[in-house]
Amino acid sequence: METTELLKRVRRIEIKTKGLSRQIFSGEYQSAFKGRGMSFSEVRSYQYGDDVRNIDWNVTARSNEPYVKVFEEERELTVMLLVDISKSSFFGTTKQLKNELITEICAVLAFSATNNNDKVGLLLFSDKVEKFLPPKKGRGHILRIIRELLDTRPTGSGTDIGMALTYFSNMVKKRSICFLLSDFLADGYEKPLRLAARRHDLIGMHLYDPRERELPAVGLIHARDAETGKMEWVDTDSRRVRKHYTDWYEKNLEYYKSSFQKSGADSMSVETTEDYAKALLKFFKAR
C-alpha cells in the first residue's frame, strides 16, 4: 500500500473508532476488566464504621486521633491483541473483508484501553509470528498498531493458533487481558489455550463471513485455497461436496467453542455484516 493511502486509511479508522471507544466503550471497558489489586492512596480521619484493620497507627500516634489508610484499585492493565493475519482473513463477500473488521475492532479495543491509561501490545501471526509489538501507551503507539494491521501481509502459508499462544505466554509474563481474533479455521490449540488462560484474562473473538458457513450451489468452479495457494476444481452442485465443507466448518467452530469453554476463557462471534459496536457493548455488559 502506498504511504499516502495508508496514512489516509489509518486516519479514517482513528476518527471512527476513537469516537466509538470514547463515547460508548470507556465506561463499559473499565467495568468489564478489573485492575490487579488495591494500592495505598491517602489517609483520612477515622469515621464510624471504618474497618479498624485499616488504621494507620503511625499517623494516629503523631496526631493523637485515629486515622485510616484509604486504598484504591490499581487500574493500569496490559492489553494484548493476538491477531490472525493468515490468508483466509483476507476474504469477504460483503462490505468488509474479515481483516478489515478485525482492524476496526482492534482499534476500538486499543483506544478504549488507552483511554483508561492501559498499555496495549500486538502480536500478528499466521503459521508463524509475523510481528510483535511490546505493550506501550500513547496515541502514537495505537496508530502504529493500526498501520501494522492494515499493511502487514503474511509470509507464512497457514494458521497455527497454538504456536501464537505459546509465543505470547513466553513473551508476556505479567497477567494481561488478551484478545485473540481469528476465523478459527484450525484446531490443535486446546492445550496452549488452557495454559495461557491460567495466567491471563483470555477472550476469543471469532470473526466470519456469512458465505463461509455454507458452500453455495453454483456449479463447477475453479477455486484457490487461500492459505496453500492450491487450485482445484470443485463441483458445488454436489450435495456430498457441500456437506463435506459444512461438516468441516462446523467441526472447527465446535472445537473453538468447546476449547474456550474448557479453558474457562470467554468467547464471542461477530459476522462481517453485523454491527460490531453492539456486539462488543453486549459482551462488555455481560462481563
Image (spheres, rainbow, N blue to C red):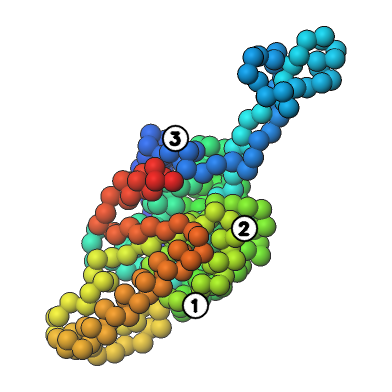
Q: Earlier in the sequence, mark 2 or mark 1?
A: 1
The answer to whether residue 3 shows anywhere in this view is no
From this view, report whether residue 238 is shown above or below residue 31: below
The residues bearing labels 2 and 1 have C-alpha atoms spaced at a distance of 20 Å
Quadrant in which residue 15 is drawn: top left
Up the image or down, 120 lies above or below 160; here it is: above
Q: Position of residue 196 (x, y in %)?
A: 58, 63
Q: Which residue carries the number 3 mark? A: 27
Q: Position of residue 179 (x, y in %)?
A: 49, 56
Callout 2 crowding tier (Cα within 10 Å): few <14, some 14–19, many ≥20: some
Disc 1 element: loop
Circle 2 residue:
199
In the rendered view of the protein, which quadrant contains the N terminus? bottom left
Question: How far is the residue under mark 3 from the one under mark 2?
Answer: 25 Å
Instruction: Answer above or below: position of 17 versus 128.
Output: above
Q: Which residue is mark 1?
A: 188
User: Left or right: 114 with respect to 69?
Assistant: left
Q: Earlier in the sequence, mark 3 or mark 2?
A: 3
- Given residues 247 and 182, the one toward you in this image is 247
